[in-house]
Image (tube, rainbow, N blue to C red):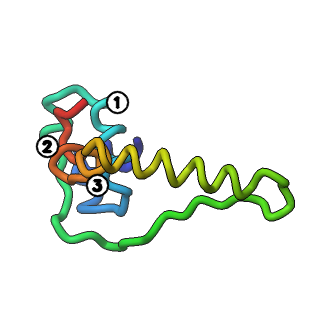
Amino acid sequence: MLNFRRLLFDRIDAFPEEINVGYHILRRELDPEEASRITHHPRPLLENESFVLFPKTRPDTAQLTDRFNERLQAFRDSGRYNHYFESHSQASAGSN
């Protein structure tokens, strides 16, 4: 939150933040006028992949993996996965 205030008061010009987290903070912590004064650079500073880890020692790890994969596929099939990761739907101070 402090870095967003620094941007508003011209103390800094930029800072790195995960885009969805940043816009969530803007929506939660700033009023709409303040939030509208902050944007993001269109080119990401860093792109990384996410992974789900399960302990090898759990006897139900194979079942957990299968269940996760099934739910992830249902999420993708429903179209909600792509909607979530579209930058224009998440990366907007006015989005919910």
Residue placed under numbered mark 1 in the picture: 29
Position of 95 relative to 22 (above/below): above
Other-residue count near label 1 (Cα within 10 Å), few / some / many at <14 / 14–19 / ≥20: few
Mark before the other along the chain sequence, 3 or 2: 3
- Looking at the image, which residue is at 77% across and 60% down? 55
Determine whether label 3 and label 2 are within 8 Å by CB.
no
Mark 3 and mark 1 lie on one chain; the one further toward the N terminus is: 3
Front-most of residues 82 and 30:
82
Q: CA distance from mark 3 to mark 2?
A: 14 Å
Label 3 crowd (10 A; few <14 / some 14-19 / many >=20)? few
Q: Is residue 44 above or below residue 4?
A: below
Q: Residues within 10 Å of mark 2 (few under 14, many from 20)?
A: few
Q: Secondary structure at mark 2?
A: loop
Q: Is the residue 3 above or below the residue 93 in the image?
A: below
Q: In front: 68, or 34? A: 68
Query: What residue sits 22% from the left and 26% below the top?
Result: 31
Of 84 and 23, nearer the camera is 84
> Which residue is labeled 3 in the image?
11
Res 74 quadrant in image: top left
**Picture quadrant where residue 47 is located:** bottom left
For residue 37, the mark is 2
The residue at the point 25 percent across, 51 percent down is 82
| Mark 3–mark 1 distance (CA, rounded to whole Å) | 18 Å
Q: Is residue 75 left or right of residue 38?
A: right
